[in-house]
Image (cartoon, helix red, strand yellow):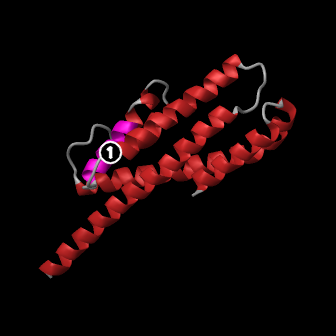
Amino acid sequence: MLILVSTLVQVVLALTFGTKPKLYAETSSLAGVGLIGAVAVFLCWFWRCRLNAEVFAPAGHRHSARAAIWTWFIPVVMWWAPRRITLDIWRASGAAGSVWVINAWWVAWLANSLGVVVFNVTSQARGNSPYVAAVHIIAAVLAVLMIRQVTAAQDGKVREAATQSAQRS
């Protein structure tokens, strides 16, 4: 939910102030705080999911649990490793169905990251682009869907294990 709130604040700023650098700079600190909070909460969730995945299926992980955090911050590695970790978490959690949400979220996240860089390099104005904001919204919505699906799969795996344990007792 924090991801959506942060995104909405950024979109409101983009639509209200457009590319007016002074106004945007004065108001974007609020969005920055929200974004930092969303990133921290997301990384905690992601790391916990990776730890859970190792309990569910100890083998078959391409990266360590620590990599669930550090891969987000290493250039080039950050463009592919977190997606692979997410897919490993998905498989270990016994999630049914397609991985389309993970793939769509990842493409939107990459497009948003690239859009921010391209806009800031090519635009004389320093602010926010409505196009980048639109991609950010799409990435945020897909992130929330992905989080819900992974969490539901892991909750189901825990319930299944608890039921099996109770039946053995």
Q: Identify whether 24 is placed above or below 124.
A: below
Which residue, given by chain and number where applicable, does mark 1 sit on? 99
Q: Is residue 77 left or right of residue 141?
A: left
Can I make out residue 141 in this image? yes
Q: Is residue 67 visible?
A: no
Which is nearer the eye, 86 or 23? 23
User: Residue 20 sits in which quadrant?
Assistant: top right
- Name the dominant secondary structure of the magenta segment: helix
Give the magenta part as a residue range.
83-92
Is residue 7 shown above or below 115? Answer: below
Q: Under tag 1, what secondary structure?
A: loop
Q: Position of residue 62 (x, y in %)?
A: 28, 37
Which image quadrant is residue 16 in? top right
**Which residue is at a point 69% across and 17% down the rendered structure image?**
122
Q: Residue at x 53, y 42 (%)?
A: 139
Q: Answer whether residue 89 is magenta in the image.
A: yes
Report if residue 54 lies within the magenta region: no
Residue 76 lies left or right of residue 156; in this view the side is right
Q: Which residue sits at x=65%, y=38%? A: 133
Q: Is residue 138 left or right of residue 79?
A: right
| Residue 99 place in picture, x, y as percent | 32, 45
